[in-house]
Image (spheres, rainbow, N blue to C red):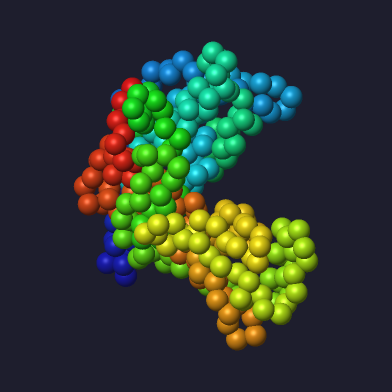
C-alpha cells in the first residue's frame, strides 16, 4: 500500500516538474523560433522597370514585371517543381512579357494584363492557398527571381517568342522561328499521361466537321476523305485535308479537344479513333522534359539553350 502511494506521488512530482520546465522554456523556444525566422535572408529582386497593368474591381494596379511573374508562375505550375525547372519558367514568362511589350511598338514600358493572354492568380489567393507557409514560399520564389533577375531569352539580339508546352511527343514540334527546331525530349514518353486515345462515332465526327466545312459532309466514305499531313521528320500534324477542305492541326486539335497536335486518325470498329501523344503545342520547352534534365544536374540556362536553338540568356 505504501509502495503504491509512493509511486503515485513520484509520478505526480515528475508531471509537475515537466510542466514547470515547459512553462519556463516555452518563452525561450518561441523567442528562438522567432529569432531564427527574423534572421532568414529576405530576397528582394531589382525592379525590371517594365510593367503589367492589372485590372480588377474597377481599378488598375501597375505591377513591375518581376512582381507579376509569380502570379503567372503558380497558375501555370500549381505543383512544386525543382528550382532549376522553376527558373526556366520564370525566364520564359519574363521573356514573353518583354516580347509583348516590344511588339506594341509604341514606346510604352507597360502592357495591360488582358493583352498578354496569360493565366494569373493574386497574392491574396496565394496567401489563402499556402496558409502558414506563405512567407517561406513567397521568399523562396523571390530568391529564384533574384537569381534570374531581369534575364530574358534572346535570339540575334531580340527577345524570342518563348513557346512552351507541358509534354512533347518524344521530339519537340518544329516551329516558325529559327530557334524552334525539333529536339529530342525522350523522357516525356515515360510520363503517365503521355498518350491519350479518343473514340468518335461517325455522327459525332460529321457534326463537328460540319461546323468547319463549306459543304455538309455525309457519313459515307468519311475515312477516305481525311488525310493527315505531317511536318517533315515529325509526328506532329501540320494540317488535315477533309475532301477539298483544309484544316490546320491547331484547328483540328481544338475542334476534337485532343491534347496535342501529334495525333493519328483511323477507322476503328463502327467509328473512328485518334491517338494523341504529348500535351500542348509541342513547340519550344517541354516542362516535363525540363524537369527531367534538372534531375540530371542541368542548369536552367543549359535547359533553355537545349530547347531553344542558338539563343542567349542574359539581363
User: Where does the N terminus fall, quadrant-wise?
Assistant: bottom left
- On the image, the x and y values in percent for residue 163 come to 45, 42
In this rendering, is residue 267 above or below 99?
A: below
Residue positioned 55% across, 57% down in the render: 239
The reply, left or right, for residue 92 in relation to residue 222 is left
Residue positioned 27% across, 67% down in the render: 3
Q: Quadrant of residue 188?
A: bottom left
Residue furthest right in the image: 216
Count of numbered circles on the image: 0
Residue furthest bottom in the image: 269
Residue positioned 63% across, 71% down in the render: 225
The reply, left or right, for residue 63 in relation to residue 189 is right
User: Where does the C terminus fall, quadrant-wise?
Assistant: top left
In terms of depth relative to the viewer, which is nearer, 233 or 72?
Answer: 233
Residue furthest left in the image: 297
Residue furthest top in the image: 107
- On the image, the x and y values in percent for residue 280 come to 50, 53
Q: Quadrant of residue 268?
A: bottom right
Residue 73 in view, yes or no? yes
In terms of depth relative to the viewer, which is nearer, 135 or 271?
Answer: 271
In this rendering, is residue 234 above or below 157?
A: below
In this rendering, is residue 113 above or below 15?
A: above
The reply, left or right, for residue 253 in relation to residue 158 is right
In terms of depth relative to the viewer, which is nearer, 164 or 147?
Answer: 164
- On the image, the x and y values in percent for residue 15 come to 34, 51
Residue 167 in view, yes or no? no
- On the image, the x and y values in percent for residue 73 come to 47, 39
In terms of depth relative to the viewer, which is nearer, 202 or 148?
Answer: 202
Residue positioned 57% across, 15% down in the render: 106
Amino acid at each position: 500500500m505504501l509502495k503504491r502511494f509512493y509511486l503515485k506521488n513520484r509520478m505526480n512530482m515528475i508531471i509537475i516538474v515537466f510542466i514547470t520546465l515547459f512553462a519556463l522554456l516555452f518563452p525561450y523556444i518561441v523567442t528562438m523560433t522567432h529569432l531564427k525566422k527574423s534572421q532568414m535572408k529576405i530576397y528582394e529582386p531589382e525592379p525590371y522597370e517594365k510593367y503589367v497593368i492589372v485590372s480588377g474591381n474597377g481599378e488598375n494596379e501597375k505591377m513591375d514585371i518581376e512582381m507579376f511573374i509569380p502570379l503567372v508562375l503558380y497558375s501555370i505550375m500549381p505543383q512544386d517543381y525543382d528550382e532549376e525547372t522553376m527558373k526556366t519558367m520564370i525566364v520564359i514568362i519574363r521573356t514573353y512579357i518583354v516580347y509583348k511589350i516590344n511588339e506594341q511598338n509604341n514606346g510604352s514600358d507597360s502592357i495591360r494584363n488582358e493583352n498578354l493572354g496569360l493565366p494569373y492568380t493574386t497574392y491574396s489567393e496565394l496567401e489563402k492557398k499556402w496558409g502558414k507557409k506563405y512567407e517561406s514560399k513567397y521568399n523562396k520564389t523571390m530568391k529564384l527571381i533574384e537569381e534570374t533577375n531581369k534575364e530574358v531569352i534572346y535570339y540575334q539580339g531580340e527577345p524570342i517568342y518563348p513557346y512552351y508546352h507541358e509534354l512533347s511527343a518524344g521530339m519537340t514540334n518544329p516551329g516558325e522561328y529559327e530557334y524552334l527546331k525539333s529536339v529530342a525530349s525522350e523522357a516525356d514518353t515515360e510520363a503517365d499521361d503521355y498518350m491519350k486515345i479518343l473514340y468518335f462515332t461517325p455522327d459525332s465526327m460529321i457534326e463537328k466537321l460540319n461546323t468547319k466545312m463549306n459543304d455538309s459532309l455525309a457519313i459515307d466514305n468519311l475515312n477516305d476523305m481525311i488525310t493527315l499531313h505531317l511536318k517533315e521528320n515529325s509526328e506532329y500534324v501540320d494540317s488535315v485535308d477533309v475532301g477539298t477542305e483544309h484544316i490546320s492541326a491547331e484547328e483540328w486539335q481544338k475542334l476534337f479537344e485532343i491534347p496535342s497536335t501529334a495525333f493519328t486518325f483511323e477507322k476503328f470498329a463502327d467509328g473512328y479513333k485518334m491517338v494523341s501523344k504529348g500535351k500542348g503545342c509541342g513547340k519550344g520547352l517541354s516542362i516535363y522534359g525540363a524537369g527531367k534534365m534538372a534531375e540530371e544536374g542541368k542548369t536552367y540556362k543549359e535547359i533553355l539553350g537545349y530547347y531553344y536553338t542558338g539563343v542567349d540568356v542574359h539581363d
